[in-house]
Structure formats: C-alpha cells, structure tokens
Image: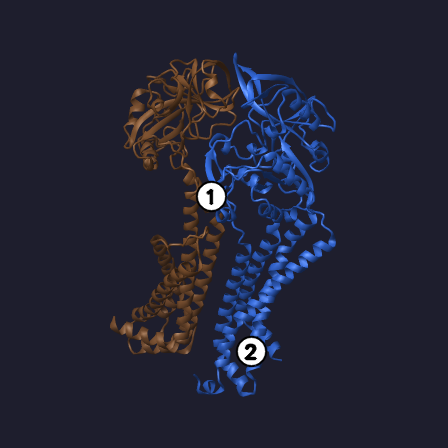
Amino acid sequence: MFVALGLKNAWRNRSRTALGIISMAIAAMIFMSGSTLGKGYPARAYWEARQMVGGEIILIPEKITLSTDTLAAGGYTWRFEKRSYDKPTLLMGFDSTPYRYGFMRGVPLDGEEEPALTRIREVAAELRDEPFVAGVMVREAMPFLRQSRQDDIDFYEYGFIEPRDVKSDRERYEMEQAVIRGGSQDRYLLEGDFMKGVDCYGWQYRVGWDFLLPTMSESGYDYENLLPVRLEMVGTVGFQQPFAPPYANPVVFVTPETFGALKEATGIPDSMTTWGITVSVDNMADLESYVSYLRRKYPDFTVYGIPQLAAAMANSEAIRSGVPLDMRRVTEVLSFMIAALLSATNLSILMMARKTEIGILRALGATRWNITCMVLAESVWIALLGALIGSLITQPAVLYQLLSNKLSSETVLSTIGAEIGKSLGFSLCAAVVFGFLPVAKALRVTPAEVMRGE
Amino acid sequence: MRDVIDLARAGFRHKLGTYLVMTLLVAVTVAGYLAVSSYWADAATVSKGKAEPLNFPYLKAHVVHAYLSNPPVSNDPEVPSPPRKFVPLFNDRELDRIRKLQHVESLSVALSQDSFSRFGYLEFLSIEAGNALWADLDLRAGGLPQNSREILIPDTVPDASSYLGQVIRVRVIRSVFPQSFWKHSVLKDAPDPEPVKDLEVVGVYHPSSPMLSGLVGWLEVRRVDDYPELDPKEVRMDWPVPNTLFLKLDDPTKAHSVSLSWRVLYPEMPEAEFPMNPPSKVEWYPDLSETMMQRATQEVAQPVFANTINAFALGAIGIFAGMFLSFLDRRKELGIMKTVGIESSKIAATISTEVVFCGVLGTLAGILIAEGLTTYYITGITGNPIVIPWTAVVRGVSVAALLLIVATYIPNAMARQGTVMELLHGRPIPIVRKRA
C-alpha cells in the first residue's frame, strides 16, 4: 500500500516528478552514448576516407602521439622534425603539417630503434590472428618526380606510388564506385594489372603517365640517377564527401605486381618503402574500442582510427598529438550522480511539503519502514522511468549503428539488453543511495510535531 | 554588522549538519580541482622536460614578398576606400624596421626550397651573401659558397667530405602543399627558372639544429624599391624570390615578444584578415619543441578538464540543494526576523555570511586536503612529488566563490524578496518581484 502511495505522490506532483525524470533521462542518454554510441560508428561512416586508405585503422611504427602511458613509462626523448618527402604516407592527405611545418617524434632514450620492417612484419602477423580483424596490409610507398611544363617554364612535381590490395579494394571498399566517369580511363585496377595505375582526383595537380623514380645509393634515395617509367593510367578515383573537401593525395595506386617490378627496376629495398600497417574491420560499431586496444597492445606504434584523421581534415587542423584519456566511465557516473542529486533535492522539498501527511500516517500506525517504502518507491519510480526514457530515446541511433554493421540479432539484442540493464541498475542505485536524504527527513517527522502545528 | 554575524553564527549552529555537508562539498570540489590541475601541470612539466631543445636562437619565419599597406578603411559606405597599395618586404627600409625590433640581434634573408638529389630529399636553403646566419654555420670542412653555383652539405650525409669539389645535381619542385598562410591573391610567386641545378660542393657543415639541416646555398641579394601601381592585378618579384627570414635573438626566451612586436609594427593594415600577420608569415620559435609537447599534454588532459567541470556542477547542485532546504526549514524564523523590523538586506546578508563562512572553511579544508593528497598519496606521472602551484590555488578559490554565488542566488533572493506573510505561512515566494 505504501509503495502505491509513493507512486500516487509522484503523480500528484507531476511538475517536480517530470523534472526528476528528465534529469535521470539525460543521465541515461549520456550513459548510453558513452557506452554504446561512443564505441564506434555506423557501417558506412567515414566511407570516403576509408576508401582512400583501404582500411579503418592505421599503425605507424614510430612514436608521434603522446599518451598518459607514454608520459608515465617515459623512455623517449621528443625531437622536432620535418617529415621527409622520402617517406610518403597516405596521412599526407589528411594532415600535411608534419611535411610543411614539422612534428614531434619520440626517440628511444637508449638510442636503439628496432628495425621498422622487422617489427612491422611481426605486428602484422599478430594482427592477422585477432578475431576482430578482417584484413591486414603492410603498406608501402615510393616517391616519384614528374616533369611538367607551364607557360614555357619547366618544373618538377612530387608524388608517390602505392600498391593496393585490389581484391579488398573492389569487394570491401567498392572502389569501382569511386572511379570518376566520363573519360576514356574509367575503371579501377583489376587483379594482376601490370604497369597500370589509377590516380587520385582532388590534389592540386593531376599526375600524368611518365614518372621519374629514384634509384638507390649508399645514403638512401638517389634522385640524381632517376629511372623514367611509364605507367598506363586506367582511371581516376575521387573521394568526395558531401559538403567537405575531397580526400586526396598526390598518389598513384598500382597493383602489388607493378610495385614489385618498380622496386626491382630501381633496386629499392622493402625497408625504404614500407611505412606501416592498415587494418580492416567488419564491425565499425566497436572501432574506437579496437583502436584503444591496439594502442595499449603496441605502445611503440602510433595508432590512428580513420575518424581521427577525417576529423583533422574536416577541421583543417593537425591530427591531435595527444591521445585523450578515456574518461567515459567517470562522465557516466558523474551524470548519474548529478541526476540523482537533483532528484533527491526534489524529493526533500516534497517531504517538507508533506510533513502533515506523514505525521498523520505515523499517527495512524505507519511504521518507519512504511514511510521509507513510500519515499523510496517515489524515488525509484522517478529514476527508473527517467532511465528507461533516456535509454529508449537513444535506441534508434544505437540500433542503426549496430544493425548497419550487420551484427547478428543475438549480438544486437544482448548489447542493447545489457546496456539498458546497466542504465537501469545505475539509476536504481543512485535513487536508493540519494533517496536516503529525503527518507531521513521524512523519518524525523513525528505525529506530536504535526499535532502541535510545528 | 555584529548583529548579522551573531545571527549567522546562530543559524550556522542551528543547521550545523546542512552546513557541514556544504562545507565538505566545497572542500572536496576544491581539493579535486587542485589535485587534478597540479597533476596535469606536473605532466606538462615532465613532457616539456623530455622535449629536445631546438638549439636555434632564431625566430624563423616564412614570409611573402609584399604586403598590402592601406590606411584604415572607414566604416561609412559613403567614404570611398583608398586604392590598394602594396609594399615590397624585400626592401632595405622594411627589413631595417624588422631588424630594429627589440631583442633582434641580426636579420638574415633566405630562400627555402624542397630539393631532391643523390642525398635524397633535403631542404635547400639559399642564404643572402654576407648575412649573419653564415657565421653560425658550424663549418667542418671546405669553405663557404661564394656564388649561386656552390653549396654546403650537412655532415649527416655518409662520408660527406668525400663530396668536396664534386658537382651534384639538385632538382627543386613546386610546393607540394599550398602555403599554409593567407596570401593576397595578387601576390604571384615567380617560379624557379632553373629546376635542375648542377652545384659544386665546397664545404661540409654540422647541423646544430633540425631547423637548419639541409643543403645550404648562396643567394643573390635582391631588393625591390617599390610597387608603384595602385590596385594592381599582379604583384610579382623577379627570381630569386626570398621566402624566409631568420631573426637572431639576443634572448631566445623573448621570441614570442618579438613576434608580437613584429605584428604591432604594421598597424596600418586594419583590413588584413586573420591569420594574415603583417607581413603574412609562418613562424618557428626557439621553444617550439617544448610548446608542442605542452600542447600534446593538454590534449591528453582535456577530458579530465571536462570532468572537473562536471564535478563542479555536481558540487553546485549539492550546495544549492543544501541551501534551499535550509532556507525552507527557516522560513518562519526569517519571517519573525522581518516582523521585528530587521531589514531584508540584513537577512540576506545573514544567509550570505553563513555561506561565505562555509565557502571559506570548505576552501581552506580543500586546500589542506589537496596538500595532504599530493604530499602523501598522489605522485606525479613519473613518480615525482607534485607541487600545487599558487595559480591553481587562486583559480580554485575563484571557482569556489563563483560556485557559491551561483548556488546560493535563489535562496538568497527568496529571503530578500519574501514578505512576512509569505515567510510565515509558507506561501510561494517569487525570485523577482515586480514593484509598483
């Protein structure tokens, strides 16, 4: 009966109840955003950037971002450098700052850097065994110069050649759809294409067919003895996202066979061309969790998720050089505490207004436990209803994210069920813990006080 | 005033539990803020300490060859704007203005290009003959270039001395990326008419800093007297067009102040849009490494900052709740005070005094708790003891004060606005009352 009375009381003070419910709903929304939506993205998110890279996560075998772990563990001196055009990567198209201005690179204190190629191959092999990984590619690139002429003046342009996993590009990243139609070169690479290439639309200049490749000398790339090479360009790909600049690089994509032949002709070893690893994942809904996991597992690598790169490009700023601390759990708990505090304040005020009513109930024989039940029922009811509403409001976005990634119905149901359960559980705990403040106030009321009109 | 303090003291004693909770909330919030901010200040110091200094007492700036120099434009549309006048930067008068800035010891003019040679990719920096920068090159073998066909190479090139006297072929490219600063569209870069250069190696130097570590060549001194044409369609400088200035500083720690003075030097450009600094430039400071590391630490710490704000919000709500309940409990008491003639302002002052007492007590307790935490329980990110900076204490106290003002505004206003009848009979009290 006293539980029903609590619920009735909540109904009688609808405006204050609504305030409590709204604050709890907001807390639940923050919780659901952090615990589900914050972990990843819908299946087609950042699609153009993923097409250009041919992966969702990039691992670079050097220390160029700072994290709490790096600060705590130490072991590095940080040096300002300008990235060399001898080491092109696809990151150039997202953030050119390291090439035009400079960046900080962590150099091991003992001065010994493990040969990057060995480490890259070792990590790539380990990554292939990870359950969430759908594809791994060791990435390579080779710079080239190209001679052009404009207004009777000769000049050189710079670019680079990248081998692509054509099967993955066609099947997973639908690269054929990124090909710009309208000319005679209107297709993407086919497996086995030899000495054929595809260039990237959106750079400040278009690359042609004739390239000057560096050869090798004892000090590295030798641009004095260049090797002229002709590649047949079969198409141009463009990665234009709506209302934003296109993702582009001065790059020519070729098949691994072509790239191998170019390396052989120039005598350039793998150690010069290999720059990192890209990882493809099937489930974008957990992408941020995978990125965090890889950052922890490979502290000697810099791990970027595609959204981080796309954000830098969209905002025309450098890729963040610090890895923000993951404070989602703290935020979630704080939001619930704020909501519960609001709810407790509301209830306390209500208890004071109902002093007479509580006094009469006590005079009629209601025990302290009955009063506690009545107050807590109201508090719990408000909290649960708020949490449920907040959780339900976020469900369309959560469902879209999970279903777009083609996760099994069992996984979707268990994820949603678990998150709603946690949200309700948190709100219940908050309601009970913070409900004791109004309970204590209510229990202090005695029938004698009420009779005396105090 | 004494009455107010007495009343406040009595009120404080009467509602000791509520005020104790409020004091604790303030204390915990302030302590949390101080501990977190000191922790991150320590992390920033550590990260700055791990940055390798640039060892380059220069302010390096990429600049354009001319700038727009117009008098202020009137806001009145009736007043016609004056014609656009461009002033050459590579002009002795202009360069002297920059050279005379405080803390600038000398000024060197150079041309920076991206070059590709048998040594791979290297920056190719051509310095004007006779400039002070030459004297700071740590020459290890050979001599300095005497004409534009001669270069120095860094000793980072394997077996560098063996190239002395040899001619190497250098290819320079058009910029890969668009320039990163705003440039007026009429300013045109004359392209290098000689993209392939055969240059003789005449010396080897040791790069003391990553800021000057590539090929070093000789640049012909060129100056432009004036661009007389008003509203020009194109402002061009004949090749070679310098694009870099090196300002040697007598005190490298003053680099940012020099940069500011440089901006102030050109006040006649009111219509120049940010980030067009006169003349448009991109700068590298001597403390660049430390600054970039500090920025990275700030990025790591950003979520902590957001959560500290959340914690403050939590504290504010708690204090508001406490104050509001305390006010409701004491409505009759306040009503009686008004009945016996105590002014509303004095009643409000009484409540304020109680809150100030809580705030002061809570802040002091918070500082003590933070001191205790940082002395005995929390160590820095690398295990160093943490010191709470006084600036953090000042910020913490200010935030706590603000928090108390915000949280107690409504109860305070209600105590001031409430009439005797409203207070005694528990009727609703408006926060703002319209006076006739």
- Residue situated furthest top in the rendering: A152
**Mark 1 belongs to which subunit?**
B
Q: Please report the residue visible at 59 percent of the width from the left and 54 percent of the height from the top.
A: A33
Residue at image position (52%, 70%) is A434
Amino acid under label 2? Thr
Q: Which mark is residue B296?
A: 1
Residue B20: horizontal and vertical position, in percent? Answer: 40, 71
Q: Residue at x 54, y 52 (%)?
A: A326
Name the mark nearer the viewer: 1 or 2.
1
* Dot 1 and dot 2 residues touching (CB under 8 Å): no
Viewer-nearest residue: B202 or B298:
B202
User: Gap between marks 1 and 2, in whole Å?
Assistant: 51 Å
Q: Residues within 10 Å of mark 2 (few under 14, many from 20)?
A: many
Q: Chain of mark 2?
A: A
Local packing at callout 1 (Cα closer than 10 Å; few below 14, some 14-19, many 20+) is many
Does residue B294 appear in this view?
no
* Whether residue A363 is visible: yes
Q: Residue B80 appears at what percent x and percent y?
A: 35, 27
Chain that appears blue: A
User: In the image, is residue A389 above or below residue A258?
Assistant: below
Looking at the rendered structure, which numbered label has been put on residue A372? 2
Q: Quadrant of residue A123?
A: top right
Colour given to chain B in the rendered image: brown
Figure check: B408 above or below A132 = below
Horizontal relation, residue B104 to residue A74: left or right: left
- Name the residue type under label 1: Ala
Q: Is residue B97 above or below residue B428?
A: above
Asked whether A428 or A135 is in front, the reply is A135
User: The residue tagged with tag 2: helix, strand or loop?
Assistant: helix
